[in-house]
Amino acid sequence: MSDEQPAMEAYRYPDGSITYPGHPVGPDGEEPVGTVDLSDYTATVLTWTTSTATPPGVRQPNTLAIVEFDVDGEPVRAIGQVTGEDEVDIGDEVRPVYCEELREPGAGIREPASQEWDGYRFEPL
Amino acid sequence: MDRVAIIGASMTQFGQRDAWIRELLAEAGQAALADADVSPDEIEHLYVSNMASGEFEGQTGVPNALAHDLAAMPAYTARIDQTSSSGGAGVYAAWQSVASGASDMTMLVGGEKMTHRSTAESTDVIASLTHPVEYKHGVTLPSFAGLTARLYLDTYDAPRESLGKVAVKNHKNGVDNPHAQFRKEVDLDTVLDSPVVADPLRLYDFCPITDGSAALVFCPESVAREYTDDYAVISGIGGATDTHVVHERADPTTMGGVVNSSEIAYEMADLEPDDIEVAELHDMFTILEFLQSEDLGFFEKGEGWKAVEEGVTDRDGDLPINTSGGLKSKGHPLGASGVAQVYEIYKQLIGDAGKRQVDADVGLACNVGGFGNCVTTTIMESR
């Protein structure tokens, strides 16, 4: 990961579970004890879709996948865009690839300043 | 214990309407009052189920507007927003107001005005319920449906055609619903050849964008008898949530909110899934009918698709599902849908469902918000 790219930050909780995104407390109600940068790992495609009816500011078509990382034996899932026009399939291995702007801020209803618009797409290996 | 009764109901024509939100709510409200033979000054609590009148139309404060338009002042009012399950949550609030003794006459009106917006804009208003890590990737509710449908078909070895048969069944039912947006049968080839919206799902796997409103009148059963012999009672009701971030669920083909809300409702009603004789499920997408029919306990996990294939859920089957035509053909004006589901069950239980009538004394409505994020399950019985 280069210095310009933020981490794909997941939170680790006292019971060992990890979530992406992080939450104020984990599944067992306890505060996080650390973070994990998921961009250091590869993941497996759990399922995917290509959405053709996309909302304002979103590329069309928009292929999305739910993927599962294995962080030292602990499963962690994430959702995100699949890079380019690549085809994916259930079970494929992917790696996170940084994207400065996943969706045009302000084109949709969400207040642009209320959230980040960069993040990680998934590239089939 | 004095049970909570429903003594009147109405729904407007669903579809593309010229009326705006205030007019839609007033139309359904006045019709329900007339149906129940209740005057506006008898209403003690007035709830409005609505997701996004501010975002869609720039009109907020709709409960007070409705109270004025119905001349129901000084009734207590509140807007109930729980996204697509605002209607079910409104049923819960209305039930609670009567069951607690706070109100002896409660009206619930659910409504949404959507069709003046483009499909992309409406999709974005609904998708605004998602977490920032979902929203920034352009995740929408239809894309959740595509992701889940692919996983379901793969996990349970279900044929793609089975999803199409949900659309065929519900469109067939909708033909006999005079309030439905679409009163037209579709065949399986039409469904399977329609344009892809969220692969593997196609246009006919999705409900339309809709304007409309529906209303119900609630009171204690002891009061109901003063008004009518034709009433139904709410014998069980439960509400539950699941994760906001959809991919964090342990099993993406299970809707925890459906499981948990129905367990509460079954226990309250002292009934089992096998006791349900007619059900309205939230078929915003065809895949949702499979998930709910399993998570409500009607069928084993991964076997809901077989019930549709075998005709079990047809109007003349053992467990008719979505006799109204469902959201699929009736339409889905967000805040109205959960109210309109209970309207259909009420009509079935009092024997006033016309050509849609089935033989049932116990019915269930399951209203889902987000992608299973919030759920209300309501069990009703004939008097």
Image (tube, coloured by chain):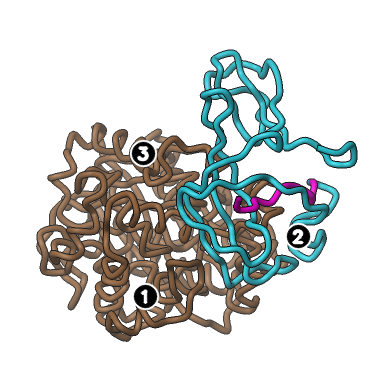
Q: Is residue B275 left or right of residue A94?
A: left
Q: Is residue B98 above or below residue B166?
A: above
Pointer 3 indicates a residue of which chain? B
On the same chain: label 3 and label 1? yes
Circle 1 is placed at which residue position?
A: B329
| Numbered badge on residue B353 | none
Residue occupying image coordinates x 77% and y 48%: A98
Q: Residue, x 51% and y 56% (percent of image)?
A: A48
The residue nearer to you, when weighing B8 against B381, is B381
Task: Decide whether the magenta segment is chiefly helix, strand or loop.
Answer: strand
According to the image, label 2 marks what residue?
A: A103
Horizontal and vertical percent for residue B218? 36, 51
Measuring from the top left, give residue B277's x and y in whole percent.
Answer: 15, 54
Q: Amino acid at mark 3?
A: Ser
* In magenta segment, residue B32: no
Spatial separation of the CA atoms under disc 3 and disc 2: 35 Å
- Front residue of this view, candidates B354 and B97: B354
- Residue B220 appears left or right of B355: right
Q: Which stretch appears magenta? A: A116-125
Q: Is residue B312 above or below residue A41?
A: below
Question: What chain letter is assigned to the residue under label 2?
Answer: A
Using the numbered discs, state the Cα–Cα distance from disc 1 to disc 2 in whole angstroms.
Answer: 32 Å
Looking at the rendered structure, whether the residues under marks 3 and 2 are on a common chain is answered as no
Colour chain B is painted in: brown
Q: Position of residue B33 (x, y in %)?
A: 40, 65
Q: Report helix, strand or loop for mark 3.
A: helix
Q: Nearer the viewer, mark 1 or mark 2?
A: 2
Q: Which residue is mark 3?
A: B261
Residue A74: tell me if it is visible.
yes
- Tell me the mark number nearer the camera, choosing from 3 and 2: 2
